Amino acid sequence: MANIVLHESEKNQSIGQATGRYTVSQLIRYFAADLPKSSNYPRHARAYVKDCIKKRFAIDAISFARYTAELPPNRVSPLRKFLFFYQQIGQPLVVPDPKRSKLSPAANELVLRFIREARNLRGEHSKETYTKALNAFFAYVDQQQQAGLPASLSGLTVTDFVLHLKAEDYSPFTINLYLSAVKQLAAWCIRRRDELKLNEHQLNELRDIDYVRGLAIERTFYKDSLEAHERTLLLDDVESAKELAILALLGLEGLRTVEVTRLRLGDLDFGRHQLQVLGKGKNTRKAIKFFAACQQIVERYLVDTDRWPLSSDRRNEVLFDDLKTYQIRYIVDKQLRKHGLKRTGMSAHSLRHTVGQLLLEAGVDLAHVQQHLRHETMETTQFYTKKRTQKTYLQQMPD
């Protein structure tokens, strides 16, 4: 049995004999070196070692027996193999890993520079999305390294990351979005190879990332939409004029949540029946039809807030003061639940799909629906046609 060796600077931390010194991660990394890449042995071994440190037990047959007493056989086998490995290397001293920074994995100078300099990330929402994606990747890298497995910004690790997300039931859309963020970071690093002093091996690992394949996505909507009578119900019995105006802009005009937060009084043209909309990640506004039903609801809200009739000196004033997208999602979900309309796939963005779907069902030309929803390509708008066809197929097909 190995004796506990407690140096004054390592009291309550170290275990084993002082024939060597390893952190938990170093020990597990050596243990994992000859194991299959997909093995879960390192994870179980890490938990066992940390338990020994916490309880000040030696890593030996006694602590092994106590730890595995109530574990199933498939959990005992990895630990038995680890204990044999530990004895073979001379039962070295093991100390906890140094405390990690509380900063998020992507909160480092390199990634922050990439987010700041990326030309395609125009809006704050896009920057937040890419930061979240890179956080997820570097958190995965950290977990792999903590388990004693090699991981880095390389094609092999990114491939494993994609498989990990798939195993965690992330949607293909989200997986491809995260993959795109990592690929763009890699490309950004390659362009700054001299500044970052990258060697040829590092460059090759970065180039390999571009060959990682994403998941196939069926080109269809991943959000549900309301029927006409359901939309009417949604706009009934709303708590305030403000919430009703928000719901109308989403469910009658088809605006995105971020577009609602950007609306200014100068964007409302009641005389010409037009709305000027600043789209996501855009710097210019596009005019769309300001439907009469929505005009009436917005006008009531302006009366309620003492801003009707509109005056030219208030053109730059926001329509909804300090409104956030998460608040809009809360309002929509609350109203959906109130009328029993909340279901899987139904969200604030579903109201935009509702507008497109109902416009087509009302006989509006596909090109006009595209212009109203401000889709970049006709292909996006055609998804509504596909959904409508699926919905009416059985009724329209003759016997």
Image (cartoon, grey):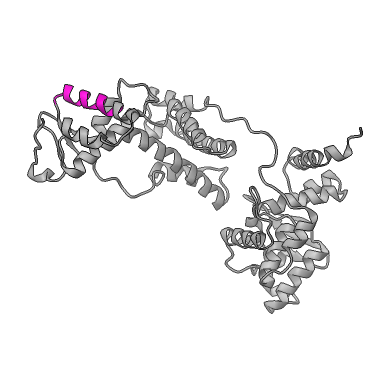
Between 69 and 325, which is closer to the camera in this rendering? 69
Q: Residue at x 36, y 21 (%)?
A: 36
Quarter holding residue 68? top left
The answer to whether residue 238 of the structure is visible from this angle is yes
Q: Is residue 83 magenta?
A: yes
18 displayed left or right of 145? left
Overall secondary structure of the magenta stretch? helix
Q: Name the quarter where the C terminus is drawn.
A: top right
User: Is 395 situated above or below 287?
Assistant: above
Indicate the quadrant containing the N terminus: top left, top right, bottom left or bottom right: top left
Rendering quarter of residue 315? bottom right
Q: Position of residue 89 (x, y in %)?
A: 17, 23
Residue appearing at x 49%, y 30% in the figure: 163
Identified at 31% across, 33% down, the residue is: 44
Judge by depth and name the residue closer to the eye, 113 or 48.
48
Q: Position of residue 24 (x, y in %)?
A: 24, 35
In the rendered image, residue 385 lying in the magenta stretch gets the answer no
Picture layout, residue 320 above or below residue 387: below
**Vertical side of 296 occupied by 110: above or below:** above
Span shown in magenta: 78-90
- Residue extending farthest bottom: 306
Farthest residue toward the right? 398
Q: Residue at x 28, y 32 (%)?
A: 45
Judge whether residue 252 can be spotted in this image. no
The reply, left or right, for residue 28 in relation to residue 94 is right
Residue 389 or residue 284, whichever sits in front: 389
Q: Residue 322, percent across and down?
A: 57, 67
